[in-house]
Image (cartoon, rainbow, N blue to C red):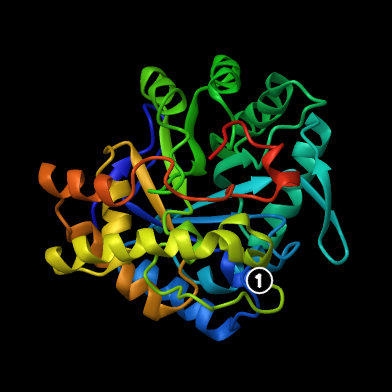
Amino acid sequence: MQTRTLGKTGPSTSALGLGAMGMSGAYGESDRAESIATVHAALDAGVTLVDTGDFYGMGHNELLLAEALRGRPRDSYQLSVKFGMLAGPGLQYFGFDGRPEAVKTFLAHSLTRLGTDYIDIYRPARLDPAVPIEETVGAIKDMVEAGYVRNIGLSEVGAETIRRAHAVHPISDLQIEYSLIARAVEPEVLPTLRELGIGMTAYGVLGRGLISGHWSAGHSAGPGDHRGASPRFTSENVDHNLALVEALRTVAEAKGCTVAQLVIAWVVAQGDDIVALVGARSRQRLTEALPALDVQLSTDDLAAIERAVPRGAARGDRYPPVHMSTLGVGN
């Protein structure tokens, strides 16, 4: 397993991380035993970064990971945890809470559910518009000094917020959606990260499955699968987006790899300061993703990929309107 360091101050971690959100209902019903087996398979393959959120399944995901990680040496993996999203029963979301007292409360719950003494990277899931980012990061800094948190990260914020947060405490990485069909970070955010020496953990590298090569025309999201509300999967957009995938398939076949491996390799090739999070919830999908690190993309390959999917080629926003308004950058 290749390793990368998240920024100037962050941890050394595997070049591919495991995103665990899909194991807790985000894409419909999941198999608990298969989820745990997938975590085990990832760790055995050398994946060390495991990403979760305290609101994934409203605690379900953290409890699942606690079970999957039990017995593993604590220094053999890193836990990245997002916090702050507010939701009631039935997952009716109603905002974010970045108040210092809430930060420390969220952390206490996560430590208990995960069965650990510390979190490797702790980050607000979104910016709370009512709380200055300096106050939120300042509260996490208190927890770093107390030994409960090792590194501070951010998620889905813009360049100005990154600078303000970094002035309070060094930021290890920004977690943000980045893929061939989500490249809004490139003009301003990515250069800011590199200027400040901050890494990136890229999620959504397969476009939530849309550009994995496995989504097909006529396929619909099942019960509980939030892709049913995603603009890029709607009937007026999905055929156009799947045509992009077929163009990628031609490039992948020439490289002797799958579409999923190609698009993961593209993200990894964008810089050695980027770690790609793979949201595999089965060993089959994990097994397909891991060889992406062995796919070497030449200048000609990268040009062919760019021709197949130019920046901005996808149709539809990456989130429904209510969630787009919470992001620091767009598509």
Residue toward you, 136 or 245: 245
Q: Is residue 158 above or below residue 119?
A: above
Q: In this image, 273 relative to 322: left or right?
A: left
Residue toward you, 313 or 298: 313
Q: In this image, 24 relative to 51: left or right?
A: right
Q: Is residue 72 above or below residue 146?
A: below
Residue 76, x across and y down, in percent: 39, 58
Which residue is at a point 15% across and 50% down the rendered structure image? 301
Which residue is at a point 59% across and 73% down the rendered structure image? 67
Which residue type does callout 1 highlight? Asp
Q: Which residue is mark 1?
A: 225
Q: Quadrant of residue 113?
A: bottom right
Task: Judge the density around disc 1: few (<14), some (14-19), many (≥20) Cα neighbours within 10 Å.
Answer: some
Residue 104, x across and y down, in percent: 76, 39
Q: Is residue 252 above or below residue 169?
A: below
Which residue is at a point 54% across and 35% down the rendered structure image? 153
Residue 106, x across and y down, in percent: 76, 46
Q: Quadrant of residue 91?
A: bottom right
Q: Secondary structure at mark 1?
A: loop
The answer to whether one can see residue 283 in this image is yes
